Image (cartoon, rainbow, N blue to C red):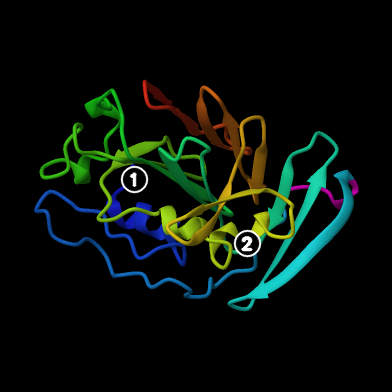
């Protein structure tokens, strides 16, 4: 099981989100938006699989590229790639070795066995709103202090959808990247697949991951 510091590390530069532990106090250091990552981004796919032109941008000293694989998967490199689902109910932040998805409204409570044991207490199965997978560890649930939806902004984690590469939606004056149904997004070893039935994110090396929808979820 992962503890809150591990889950916070998965966000890295992605968001100023603080997970609450048993005491309800902040766990781990606060993470500021835009902090650079300390390691080079992973590619996660052979360049020979890519088709079409590749768009490249530089932010926080991390090179970001986006291209399309032969099967249509959107391939990215960089520090993060974030998106919202078309329903607006789920938002996700991907890192080269992790993915976290937050759900605004759910019709289920995660099982206690899928909760991070250090998140139990003030963070209950009822209040848990985010599921995380990191590398080969089983996906776990926790609580976040605020929404991560803003990380899908085109000038932040939603950068990959700029220049008509992906779909966007304007929410409260901000253009957000949308992973449309039927689309797949890969960053490093992490792959997220958007379907009308929900979002699936997994580690390609270990198959650890989760599926998430308003009605139900699975974690492995």
x and y percentages locating residue 53 in the rendered image: 88, 57
Closer to us: 122 or 90: 90
The structure residue drawn at horizontal position 70% and vertical position 54%, both measured from the top left corner, is: 76
SS at mark 2 in the image: helix
Closer to us: 199 or 119: 199
x and y percentages locating residue 132 in the rendered image: 41, 43
In the image, the segment drawn in magenta is 44-48
Query: Is residue 67 visible to the viewer in this orientation of the structure?
Result: yes
Q: Horizontal placement of 175 versus 107: left or right?
A: right
SS at mark 1 in the image: loop
Which residue is identified by label 1? 2
Task: Name the chief secondary structure element in magenta.
Answer: loop
Closer to us: 83 or 47: 83
Which residue is identified by label 2? 159
The structure residue drawn at horizontal position 55% and vertical position 36%, both measured from the top left corner, is: 202
Q: Is residue 190 above or below residue 157?
A: above
Task: Kindly report which numbered mark, 2 or 1, lies closer to the viewer in this rendering.
Answer: 2
Q: Is residue 15 above or below residue 186?
A: below
Q: CA distance from mark 2 to mark 1?
A: 29 Å
Q: Give the quadrant of residue 181.
A: top right
Q: Horizontal placement of 43 versus 80: left or right?
A: right
Quadrant assignment for the N terminus: top left
């Amino acid at each position: 099981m992962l503890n809150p510091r591990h889950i916070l590390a998965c966000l890295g530069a992605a968001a100023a989100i603080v997970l609450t532990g048993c005491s309800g106090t902040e766990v781990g250091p606060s993470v500021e938006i835009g902090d650079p990552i300390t390691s080079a981004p992973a590619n996660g796919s052979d360049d020979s699989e890519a088709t079409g032109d590749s768009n490249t941008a530089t932010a926080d000293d991390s090179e970001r590229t986006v291209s399309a694989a032969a099967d249509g998967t959107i391939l990215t490199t960089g520090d993060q790639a974030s998106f919202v689902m078309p329903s607006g109910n789920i938002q996700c932040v991907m890192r080269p070795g992790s993915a976290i998805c937050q759900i605004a409204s759910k019709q289920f409570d995660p099982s206690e066995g899928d909760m991070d044991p250090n998140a139990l207490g003030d963070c209950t199965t009822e209040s848990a709103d985010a599921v995380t997978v990191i590398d080969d560890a089983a996906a776990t649930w926790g609580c976040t202090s605020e929404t991560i939806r803003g990380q899908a902004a085109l000038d932040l984690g939603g950068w990959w959808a700029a220049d008509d590469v992906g779909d966007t939606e304007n929410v409260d004056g901000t253009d957000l990247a949308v992973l449309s149904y039927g689309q797949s997004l890969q960053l490093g070893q992490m792959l997220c697949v958007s379907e009308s039935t929900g979002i699936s994110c997994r580690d390609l090396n270990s198959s650890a991951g989760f599926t998430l929808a308003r009605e139900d979820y699975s974690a492995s």
